[in-house]
Amino acid sequence: MEESECIVCFSQYNEDEHRARCMPCGHTMCSKCLKKTIREVSKMCPKCRQHFTAARLEELPVNFSLEGMIKSSKSLKTQLELAKPCISIFEESCKKAEECKKQSQKIFKEYEEAIIRKENIIAKLQEEIKTQKNARRKMEEKVVVLDEKLSGLKEKRNSYEQAITPLNISESIREVFRWSVEVQNEAEKLISVSQGIENEIDQMMRTIRVKDDHLMENSALSISNEQAGLHVYQDKHTYNSSPAKLKMGNLDKKNQEV
């Protein structure tokens, strides 16, 4: 700062030979330069050229206000020097805080995106669960229908077996009943597969569809064949029990006796 230097020698003011003293005009010089000026014949301020009559240095007052300002300035410089590490630490902390802020904003954004993805996945899963429940309900209804058909097939088979056991039926009719047993086994396998619906519902749905179509076709064919066999059996039984057949049998016996 300009006021801290002597206007003649430009030395920094201090409390020794360069102590600041005021001239009558109000300007300041250091004590060393004032001594030289006092020795001269024409004593005047080197700045404003105003003459003064002081014969001794002590007649000129010390500029205590300037000294106070200089001391305050030096103290402030010292404080600033001491504060530099703190300021550096503070600046570094601010940088880290800014980095943390940016990082936290990035993490928060990723967290929000993760929440949105989670909600979308949950919505899809709920829709899939709803679809699977509907498929399970329809499959269970089909299983019930198959159980009823299976029970009907068992009852028909038992009645047919009881009706034709004493008779000497043809191999084709026996084949029909063997096929009905196979149909029963297939149906029982289907029911067993249905019990594992909770863990393998997708695979089971495909299996059920295939087996369902196959079973329905076989059941229709089995019923048709059984009805045809029953008609054949009824025709034979009716013919054997008719009066004409009995008369023919009696005639045959008489002819054999003769």
Image (cartoon, rainbow, N blue to C red):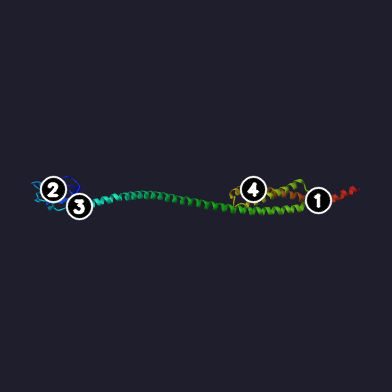
Along the polypeptide, which appears first: circle 3 or circle 2? 2
| Residue 130 drawn at (x, y percent) | 54, 53
| Residue 155 drawn at (x, y percent) | 71, 54
Cβ–Cβ under 8 Å for marks 1 and 4: no
Q: Residue at x 27, y 50 (%)?
A: 78
Q: Closest to the observer: 11 or 256? A: 11
| Residue 18 drawn at (x, y percent) | 18, 48
Left or right of 27? Residue 147 is right
How crowded pointer 2 is (Cα within 10 Å; few <14, some 14-19, many 20+) is rated as: some
Along the polypeptide, which appears first: circle 1 or circle 3? 3
Along the polypeptide, which appears first: circle 1 or circle 2? 2
Q: Residue furthest top?
A: 9
Q: Which residue is mark 1?
A: 240
Q: Which mark is residue 35?
A: 2
| Residue 125 drawn at (x, y percent) | 52, 51
Cβ–Cβ under 8 Å for marks 3 and 2: no
Please state which amino acid type lies under the numbered disc 3.
Glu
Q: Residue at x 71, y 53 (%)?
A: 154
Q: Residue at x 73, y 53 (%)?
A: 158
Cβ–Cβ under 8 Å for marks 2 and 4: no
Q: Closest to the observer: 147 or 109? A: 109
Q: Secondary structure at mark 3?
A: helix
Label 1 – label 3 distance at C-alpha = 151 Å
Q: Which residue is mark 3?
A: 67
Q: Which residue is mark 4?
A: 211
Label 1 – label 2 distance at C-alpha = 168 Å
Q: Is residue 30 visible?
A: no
